[in-house]
Amino acid sequence: MGTEGALVMDELDAGPGAAPWWRGPLVGFDLETTGTEPAESRIVTAALVEAVGGVPVRTTRWLLDPGVPIPEQARAIHGISDEQARTRGRPAAEAIEEIAAALCEKLGRGTPVVAFNAPFDLSLLDAELRRHQLAPLAERLAGELVAPVLDALVIDRAVDRYRKGSRGLQRVCEVYGVELAHAHDAASDALAAVRVAVALGRRYPAEVGELTLAALHEQQVHWYREWAEGLQSWLRAGKDPQAVVDARWPLR
């Protein structure tokens, strides 16, 4: 079944009395990488954490040899050295194929994939697939939407837009009472993103928790575009008159 078909079924099944999405299966997804630019960076570690109602039931991890040196700044964040990646990491193309296949299998079933700043992780994975001449995400999903995706950062920024301070994962976890055991470990970050999404669904039922997955996915497209346009206007009014903020979500 294609993704859009899964979303339609979700809407049909979500009748009165149906359990909200945040009580059901969710799949956390996170990457640790060589840098911060999705089009250029390489994957070093990846994780998919399958959970039900925020309780993990299965975790799959990958350690890759990215084929390029890992900058010291990146190593200081995720702790993976060049030697570790070369001696213990999987060949990049082989592991990237597995990651994409596992992710798309979940999306194809209509299981929500949860990320924190989805355009980074999904766009970087897509760039890696193209770099290694592997089928990109949309092609694997028969040209349909890369959906349903839940982006804990986008949702938090929309429902509590006037909160001051950092919107990093560690701070957001503190706001919602979620434990982040090992920040910048892909599996730990992926599980934390799932638990923040569950907390958002529970705390904001009308805006988030009671929506169907299809409706919430589309709402995030709108929320992200609104945020990107606002940031772009702010940058152009001050620091950079030529600033462009990409408004595409969840994949660039």
Image (spheres, helix red, strand yellow):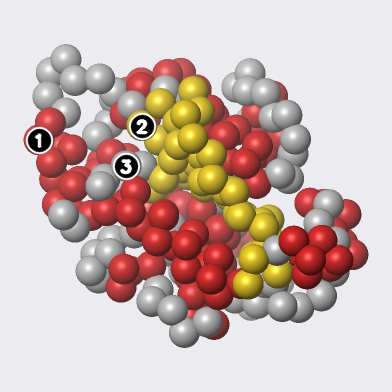
Dot placed on the residue nearer the N-terminal end, 3 or 2: 2
- The N terminus - image quarter: bottom left
Instruction: Give the residue displayed 53% in from the left and 71% down from the top.
Output: 94
Which quadrant of the structure image shows residue 136? bottom left
Disc 3 to disc 2: CB gap under 8 Å: yes
Side of 242 relative to 146 (left or right):
right
Which numbered circle lies on residue 233?
none
Counting from the top left corner in percent of width and height, residue 11 is at 15, 37
Q: Mark 2 points at which residue?
A: 25
Q: In front here: 228 or 234?
A: 228
Instruction: Give the residue displayed 40% in from the left and 26% down from the top.
Output: 52
Q: Mark 1 points at which residue?
A: 12
* Measured Cα–Cα span from mark 3 to mark 2: 7 Å
Dot placed on the residue nearer the N-terminal end, 3 or 1: 1
Side of 64 relative to 190 (left or right):
right
Dot placed on the residue nearer the N-terminal end, 2 or 1: 1
